[in-house]
Image (cartoon, rainbow, N blue to C red):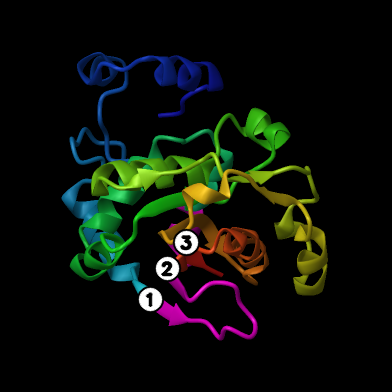
Amino acid sequence: MNKTRNDKKIETKLHCPQLLNLIYPPICGICGKLNSNFICNKCQIQLEKQAEFKIEKKAKTNYYFEKHLYIFKYEGMIRKIIINYKFNDKSYLYKTIVNFLLKNEKFFSILETYDTILAVPISKKREKERGYNQSELIAKELAKKLSKEYNNQCLFKTKNIIEQSKLNKEERQKNIQGVYELRNSNCLQDKKILLIDDIYTTGSTVNECCKILGQARPKKLDVLTLAKD
């Protein structure tokens, strides 16, 4: 069930849940069966078998964030789901992902401790090409479900660069430097911040974002990704 970019533009303009359900019936994002939770029991069980729900503490000497939380290893079924979500116009998968995540009691209790949720921004050019920012959709839905603040007015990507996935570790670190900008930093001061991204490979992208966010002097700064490569 693919949605065109025009479909998604129409969806963003609609605010009536009942009308949206008629146009886009809630389905399991994996198997496509109708399901009000956007994930059916069968697919829930399949994902649970692959889920890791890991928390990694990071050394302050090398990283600008304290913890990296992730749900899956980037392989098999999960890799296919993320590729479809990110590149194949299946933006509706964000609800399936968030609903699955919040069913884990351990992660749910951890996520409730944050004040503000942000997403790694993408350039305007990339967002126009793709039709959406995959990390932003998840961050906004997560904030909504947890009744937390979602902030997209502080961290901005100001340059369109070579995709990180096409580079090695050293190239990634150089490629990502100086591409993010902090604005309205007072909104983040003394806040417990959770930054959302889709895939963690070398950590260069989220680390650079957290370096910039650190200028706002937050009380806490951690990262959540769907998968770790």
Q: Earlier in the sequence, mark 1 or mark 2?
A: 1
Q: Is residue 126 left or right of residue 105?
A: right
Label 1–label 2 contact, CB within 8 A: yes
Residue position marked by numbered label 2 in the rendering: 70
| Residue 44 or residue 95, whichever sits in front | 95
Residue 163 higher or lower than 4, as above or below: below
Position in image of residue 85 (x %, y %): 49, 43
Residue position marked by numbered label 3 in the rendering: 225
Position in image of residue 33 (x %, y %): 24, 36
Residue position marked by numbered label 1 in the rendering: 54
Q: Residue at coordinates 28% horizontally, 40% vertically from top-left?
A: 28
Check disc 3 and report its element: helix, strand or loop.
strand
Q: Which mark is residue 172?
A: none
Instruction: Report how far apart the C-alphas of labels 1 and 3 lie in the structure.
Output: 10 Å
Packing grade of label 3 (10 A; few <14, some 14-19, many >=20) is: some
Please indicate, yes or no, whether residue 209 appears anywhere in the rendered image: yes
Q: Residue at coordinates 76% horizontally, 59% vertically from top-left?
A: 176
Give the residue type that dot 2 points to: Tyr
Q: Which residues are magenta?
A: 55-81
Is 86 included in the stretch rendered in magenta? no
Residue 94 higher or lower than 112, as above or below: above
Q: Earlier in the sequence, mark 2 or mark 3?
A: 2
Give the residue type that dot 1 points to: Lys
Residue 139 higher or lower than 110, as above or below: above
Q: Is residue 182 left or right of residue 2?
A: right
Instruction: Report how far apart the C-alphas of labels 1 and 2 lie in the structure.
Output: 5 Å
| Residue 136 or residue 179, whichever sits in front | 179
